[in-house]
Amino acid sequence: MTLRLAFMGTPDFAVPSLDALIAAGHDIAAVYAQPARPKGRGHKAQDSPVAAAATRHGIPVRTPERLDPEEIAAFAALKLDAAIVVAYGLILPKPILDAPRLGCVNVHASLLPKYRGAAPISWAIIGGEEKTGVTTMLMDEGLDTGPVLLTREIAIGGEDTAGSLGMALSELGASLLVETIRAVRAGSVAPASQSGEATFAPPLKKEDGLIDWKRSADEIFNFVRGMDPWPVAHCRLGNETLRILRTGPLAGEGRPGIIEKADGRQLVVGTGGGLLSIIELQPPGKRPMSAASFLQGRRLMRGQALQ
């Protein structure tokens, strides 16, 4: 049975879910996405990944700055069975939540109630979690507090970044969404209240990427992975800002933020617990490079400080 749906999402993460619904034969009456934003060197306005995908499929796209009464009325006029929300970026007011016959179904990239909020993938890695997953839920007026429909787990690998884990979760979320819609339509899933301790995953800002060298090497290793691809972990070396792209914890002790080894191939820094090898980094105006390549053009000394 085909359902009449609206899809509300913006970034790359949401595109597999939209594609999966279309492939499953559902009627997508409209796609809602954030407005086009300036990007690139030319700062030209570019459609979001979801808006671009919808256009390729010939689906009407709406990009309101806010969900005002006029937009709410237009949404209600769609006469939807359900709305699907995947990383949309706007808070849905109660009239929107109440308009579809079966409610609004959200795909969230964590095992709720852990990591409620805008950046669950990054914070799960930063938090040193060994697993995470995807939750589908019926939305209410709270921040990711609605009753759970289905969940799926996935392991977090030691080399996973927020980018690589996000790609895996986006595909997992797409398949779980199709399964969820099938179960909701059949009445074979009972929404269940969230249980367990809630944790939060607030939005990340550029300044959040600054490395705190007083943390342990393991914590900084997780932090660097969780900040990739955005906002990217960084530190200061003199007057330069270095983007730190890949690291590895090492045994041993050192002073937090102090270079303990710079021998032409290895760049090792002390932390609040253990040593950290900087494997890949990016100086200002340069491409990403190995520590060995970086050190070829530098005369770094043991005892210099990173801030």
Image: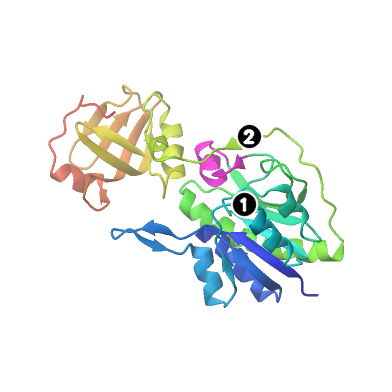
Relative image position of residue 112 (x, y in whole percent): 68, 43
Crowd around label 2: few <14 · some 14–19 · many ≥20 (10 Å)? some
Quadrant (top left, top right, bottom left, bottom right) of the N terminus? bottom right
Q: Residue at x 55, y 41 (%)?
A: 124
Can you see residue 160?
no
Three-letter amino acid code at the position of disc 2: Thr
Nearest the camera: 270 or 174?
174
Instruction: Count up the numbered dots.
Output: 2
Q: Which residue is mark 2?
A: 199
Three-letter amino acid code at the position of disc 1: Ile
Q: Residue at x 68, y 34 (%)?
A: 198
- 122 inside magenta stretch: yes
* Residue 169, numbered circle: none
* Residue 154, numbered circle: 1
> Eyeballing the image, is 238 above or below 82?
above
As measured in the structure, the alpha-carbon distance from the residue carrying label 1 to the one carrying label 2 is 18 Å
Residue 200 falls in image quadrant = top right
Q: Earlier in the sequence, mark 1 or mark 2?
A: 1
The residues colored magenta run: 115-129
Nearest the camera: 208 or 172?
208
Q: Residue at x 53, y 70 (%)?
A: 53
